[in-house]
Image (cartoon, helix red, strand yellow):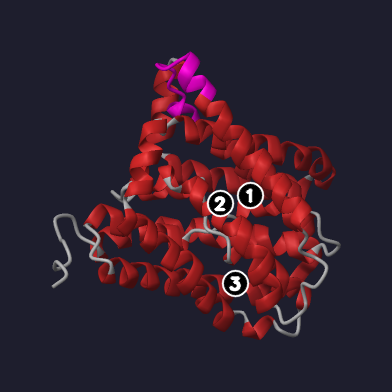
Amino acid sequence: MDARRLLAAADRHQVALYLLALAAGISLGAAVPAVAGGLEIVVEPAIAVLLLVTFLGVPLLQLGAALRDARLLLALLAVNLVAVPLIVLVITRPLAGSPDLLVGALLVLLAPCIDYVIVFTALAGGAHQRLLAATPLLMLGQLLALPVLVPLLSGGAAAGLIEAGPFLRAFGLLIVLPLLGAALLQRLAPRLDLSAAMAPLMMLVLLAVTASQTPRVLGAGPALLVLVPVYVGFLVLATAAGILVSRLAHLETASARAVTFSGATRNSLVVLPLALAMPSALAPAAVVLQTLVELVGMVVLVRLVPRLLRDGSRPPAPR
């Protein structure tokens, strides 16, 4: 099988390959904990390259079109900056007695995903191109909201832990540089298509993240188990919120699916470097555990959401 066919096969079986990468990373991190330090260095550059390829798939002219789709943008912002914080406020109350776990959970649950959400939205028949074009706005929104929301919802537990510096660094490294790089490549090589590299790059990121953080997760022991029902509950409630907001906004089916996946999928890979900068080892472990729960949930949602938001169905026009 030549490289082109191999990449095409990887593209067709992305979800299974992502789960395989997770399993391999967990196994490697558990069997050889010494690899954690080396792989942790790989995480941020790998995410940056992944986002470069992601942004390369969006023509710059389409960014303007996405910004003109006011109904979709308002629905995305309503889900991620209004509905999700309310859900998170309620479901994280059982963590109030464990400040380190609470801060880690808040950090990841309040940040909308900007990378593999595109893949899952596409697999579910959602408007993945329009969602992709809106990712810089979503990242900017969380850049402004997280330093306010995390301390507010933590009841003071995050005081002094959330600083502007790491957020600005993450925004520059993981959004600005990839976006500028994609713009430059589109200008110099307009026919360049690296979309086939998305699946292998995502596998590399997931492998590096899980292998580097598994020793931390295992070191935390049973303390992390309380997070599992919180993360599962978030998936259920955020999916319901996405569907409700989409119907209230009278979005067509593909856009409704995009909004639903945007609400349910979180930015664990991009906020992980922020969690790693915190003094507690539990915060990054909480972020990684959310990735594991979420990816299993995505396998269910890519089949369930198309049934809940059927093709050809359109909410009634506003009166």
Q: Position of residue 146 (x, y in %)?
A: 64, 64
Quick check: can you spot residue 187? Answer: yes
Question: Which of 293/45 is in front?
Answer: 45
SS for dot 1: helix
Mark 3 and mark 2 in contact? Answer it, CB < 8 Å.
no
Q: Residue at x 80, y 41 (%)?
A: 35
Measured in 3D between alpha carbons, the distance from the residue under mark 3 to the one under mark 1, in whole angstroms, is 20 Å
Q: Residue at x 42, y 42 (%)?
A: 133
Circle 3: residue type: Val
Point out the frontmost of discs 3 and 2: 2
Circle 2: residue type: Met
- What residue would you read off at disc 1? 270
For the record, the magenta segment spans 184-198
Measured in 3D between alpha carbons, the distance from the residue under mark 3 to the one under mark 2, in whole angstroms, is 26 Å
Decide if residue 43 is on the left or right side of residue 297. right
On screen, residue 314 above or below 254: below
Q: Position of residue 96 (x, y in %)?
A: 71, 84
SS for dot 2: helix
Mark 2 and mark 1 in contact? Answer it, CB < 8 Å.
yes
Corner quadrant of residue 145: bottom right
Question: Which of 12/102 is in front?
Answer: 102
Decide if residue 191 is on the left or right side of residue 135. left
Mark 3 or 1 closer to N-term? 3
- What residue would you read off at disc 3? 228
On screen, residue 273 above or below 149: above
